[in-house]
Amino acid sequence: MIVQSFTFNGFQENTYVVSDDSLECIIFDPGCSNGSEEQRLQQYIDGAGLKPVRLINTHCHIDHILGNKFISDTYELPLEAHAGEVPVLESGKMVSQNYGIPYTESPPIAKYLEEGDEISFGQTKLTALFTPGHSPASLSFYHADSKTLIAGDVLFQGSIGRTDLPGGNFETLIRHIKEKFLVLPDDTTIYSGHGPATTIGHEKQHNPFLQ
């Protein structure tokens, strides 16, 4: 499994294209906010000969959904996310106005994902983990064979997702990190929604929020 990351928009959000030898791929959290960023993402996908088969939001905060419409329209993909993120997605226009950033309205969630769902593409299967706390119904996605975790904004290198936004809760976030993440192998690679990749083992030892 190949994970390619792109850092987009003023929030420095990480967008991920996850592919395998079949050349099918999933696009997670397209945060591209202008034509140049859209072009970068499309050039990688098309240049690598990839076939996008799923568009998934780990959660629906504004910085993770700015490119939803572009990807959905370009590759004719329905949006997938947890049902609990619907209010967050629907607030996108208001939030973008509060921040003063351009926003093309995202398509609605067409397929609801749940804890334990198998997310299949090509020869690969990811498992959905329910990890709220940063947002009301954030999902993370784990690939056991390669020990890879697409974590959204749940856990970062040396930090955690903020919990002061609507639907956030510090205790909930910490509990789900401990119950869903820290039980994974220490050499699991974490691909977060912001910042560099890290590992479960590193965060166990060095993340001040987990001590």
Image (tube, grey):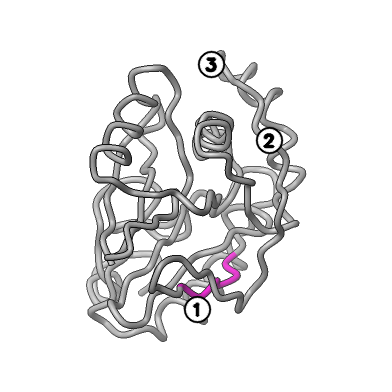
- The residue type indicated by label 3 comes to Ile
Labels 2 and 1: the sequence-earlier one: 2
- The residue type indicated by label 2 comes to Pro
Answer whether residue 65 is magenta in the image.
no
- The CA distance from mark 2 to mark 1 is 29 Å
* Residue 56 placement (x, y as % from top left): 54, 52
Q: Residues within 10 Å of mark 2 (few under 14, many from 20)?
A: some
Q: Is residue 43 above or below residue 26?
A: above
Element under label 2?
A: loop
Q: In which quadrant is the N terminus drawn? A: bottom left
Q: Is residue 199 above or below residue 192?
A: below
Q: Which residue is mark 3?
A: 101
Numbered badge on residue 165: none
Labels 2 and 3: the sequence-earlier one: 3
Name the image quarter holding residue 89.
top right
Name the image quarter holding residue 184.
bottom left
* Residue 36 placement (x, y as % from top left): 33, 18
Numbered badge on residue 107: 2
Q: Which residue is mark 1?
A: 180
Name the image quarter holding residue 150.
bottom left
Write down the region rendered in magenta: 126-131
Labels 3 and 1: the sequence-earlier one: 3
Residue that appears at 57% across and 37% down? 72
